[in-house]
Image (cartoon, grey):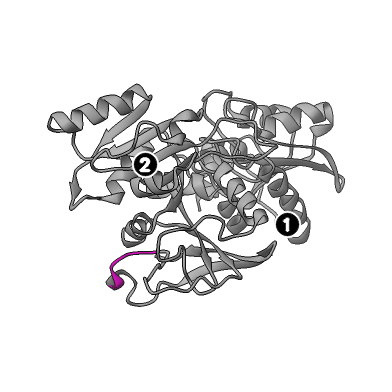
Amino acid sequence: MNDEKGIKDGSKKHRPMPTVKKQTDIFFMQRALELAAQARGQTSPNPMVGAVLVKNGKIIAEAWHQKAGEDHAERIALKKAGKSAQGATLYVSLEPCCHFGKTPPCVDIIKQSGVSRVVAAVRDPFPQVSGKGFDVLKDAGIEVVEGVLEKEARRLNEVFFTVHEKKRPFVMLKWAMSLDGRTSDDWGHSKWITCEQSREFAHRLRSWHDAILVGVGTIIADKPKLTVRLRDFNRTQPACIILDPKLDTPPDSPCFNEDHEIYIISSPIKGIALKNKAEKLIQKKAKIISIDAHNEKFHIPTVLKELLQAGIQSIFVEGGRCVAGSFFEAEVVDKIGAFIAPKIIGGFAPTSPLICNPSCNKDFRPLQDVAIKTIGSDVYIEAYLTL
């Protein structure tokens, strides 16, 4: 009915009916997703996007978006292809943009290139796009197919979709424990529960997030640097976030010696003692965000709202147990990464990875898309929470 109306007023008369070439489309879209993933951890706040140009069944050009502010994947691939893009099919892992940001709209160069068909994995959730890019292409007479490997595309850009759909940063909760479920011994010692390969992978996980979050207890007990320490890491370090209601973070903590932004979430700064603490931490270039706390516990959704306003789109929560539990209770954990080492620690004190109200998990919170693999001598379990 809408198409008939479009023919009468001329607004949609050039729109071709989309055709899905299932196996072919899936094959080339898988390649676009592989390309996009090469920029993992490098494009924030932009999504990861891959593009593949195919003509007569062969790839003639391909590319991926490498960094925010630089050319998008579609533009790079089309520049590579030049005139040979005429009549080709463009596979792209996210709907092409139709607005001016730091770069021009991708739909413009797609129209100019002579591409006859565009296959996109998923619609862009960004309000300025969100289907409008598809409409521009259809109005130009280009065939558009969407939804090919949509679930995989959404998983790839889980941070981007969480930010635009849930209006908060994406949260991944990580912990390491022994086979008997302990994160430390009775005296709180927890160093090197996992093997070297697991610790290296944990740094890789850090590198894929905008920020690493811990509680002040971890800062005092473990004196962590909270940095990515990988040989091939040459980008800006993730920000460091410390939940510290009473500003007990020592100004000489090792994390202050590293080249990263530091955010300290504190209670409202009242009284001379707290103001003096704040001044010392600010001298260390810490940025203090004041939020009301109840019994020294923050309202986590409010914390996330403030951090999103500060430009942080993904958070890697490393503990301790009370901090991890508070995120779990608030039902804002999107993803879990658990390392299990083949060690028995034993002891008398309970050391669950999570300290939280049992009522928040009375139905045993189900997990989805569970992946289990071995890393060195350890077992790593990664899963998503269903809410």
For badge 2, the amino acid type reads Ile
Q: Which residue is mark 2?
A: 242
Left or right side of 104 for 90: right
Residue 380, compared with residue 270, is above or below; it is below
Name the quarter where the C terminus is drawn: bottom left
Q: Position of residue 57 (x, y in %)?
A: 86, 48
Give the SS element for disc 1: helix
Q: Which residue is mark 1?
A: 26
198, 37: nearer the viewer: 198
Give the SS element for disc 2: strand
Q: Is residue 96 magenta?
A: no
Extreme residue in the front direction: 187
Residue 86, compared with residue 163, is above or below; it is above
Q: Position of residue 72 (x, y in %)?
A: 64, 31
Residue 41, compared with residue 187, is above or below; it is above
Q: Is residue 239 visible?
A: yes
Give the extent of the magenta segment.
354-358
Dominant secondary structure of the magenta stretch? loop
Determine crowd level at label 2: few under 14, some 14-19, many 20+ residues with C-alpha closer than 10 A: many
Q: Residue at x 34, y 29 (%)?
A: 287
Q: Position of residue 102 (x, y in %)?
A: 54, 23
Residue 193, compared with residue 366, is above or below; it is above
91, 343: nearer the viewer: 343
What is the spatial separation of the Cα atoms under label 1 and label 2, in whole angstroms?
43 Å
